[in-house]
Image (spheres, helix red, strand yellow):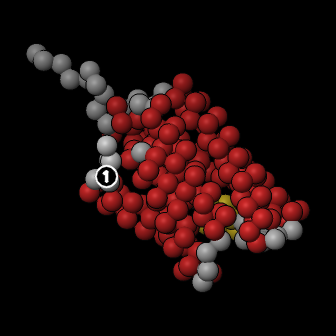
Amino acid sequence: MKKELSVKSVVAIGIGAAIFVILGRFASIPTGIPNTNIETVYPFLALFSVIFGPLVGFATGFIGHALKDFITFGNPWWSWILCSGLLGLCFGLIGKKLRVTEGIFALKEVIFFNISQVIINFLAWSLIAPTLDILIYSEPANKVFLQGIITSISNSLTVGILGTLLLKAYASTCVKKDSLHKE
């Protein structure tokens, strides 16, 4: 059976992509390495992907990053756009193992989330993005692997700190399953 996107998912993708563009454009901190910033957008992408799932996470990361590149640079950098989409997809898959929407984001979940996100960030930014940069754009290997490693570290830290805080805050707004009792 073909499963179509719900209206809720389409709206979430649109809002998520818009927020991605705004955060990516105006809330990035330069690292000193060319075209490499400390991004606040990935903690948001983690939150959005955990809440709405892997498909919304992929589309939000992919579309949001593509729009940001068009607006900021005038042309897209497809290798990094794909990695943003893959990050959203993976964050959404991690979210299936978490109970954030049930109001639970305890130490065990925090540890699982952070170990997973560090692995995903390093695979995406230190391996996939630089390899695609070399294959697609014929970029020098030493440059793109340096960018990838710096991006992996900074994204792991921002998602680890801000992403954990966002997920914890979101979980605290959700009603726990057995929290209501009949008197």
The part of the image, by quadrant, that contains residue 148 is: bottom right
Local secondary structure at mark 1? loop
Mark 1 Cα-neighbour bin, 10 Å: few <14, some 14–19, many ≥20: few
- The quadrant of the rendering that contains the C terminus is top left
- The quadrant of the rendering that contains the N terminus is top left
Tell me what residue is drawn at x 55 percent, y 67 percent.
65
User: Percent x, y for residue 32?
Assistant: 78, 68
Q: Is residue 138 left or right of residue 56?
A: right
User: Percent x, y for residue 77?
Assistant: 65, 71
User: Percent x, y for residue 44?
Assistant: 49, 54
Q: Is residue 42 visible?
A: no
The part of the image, by quadrant, that contains residue 135 is: bottom right
When the figure is inspected, residue 45 is found, relative to residue 74, above or below; the finding is above
Count the labels in the image. Answer: 1
Q: Looking at the image, which residue sits at the far left?
A: 183
Tell me what residue is drawn at x 30 percent, y 28 percent.
176
Q: Looking at the image, which residue sits at the far bottom?
A: 74
When the figure is inspected, residue 99 is found, relative to residue 123, above or below; the finding is above
User: Percent x, y for residue 153?
Assistant: 73, 50
Tell me what residue is drawn at x 32 percent, y 54 percent.
5
Task: Report which residue position mark 1 lands on.
Answer: 4
Q: Is residue 67 left or right of residue 111?
A: left
When the figure is inspected, residue 81 is found, relative to residue 105, above or below; the finding is below
Q: Looking at the image, which residue sits at the far front?
A: 1
Q: Is residue 131 visible?
A: yes
Of 166 and 50, nearer the camera is 50
Tell me what residue is drawn at x 66 percent, y 48 percent.
121
**Three-letter amino acid code of the residue under disc 1:** Glu
Of 47 and 55, nearer the camera is 55
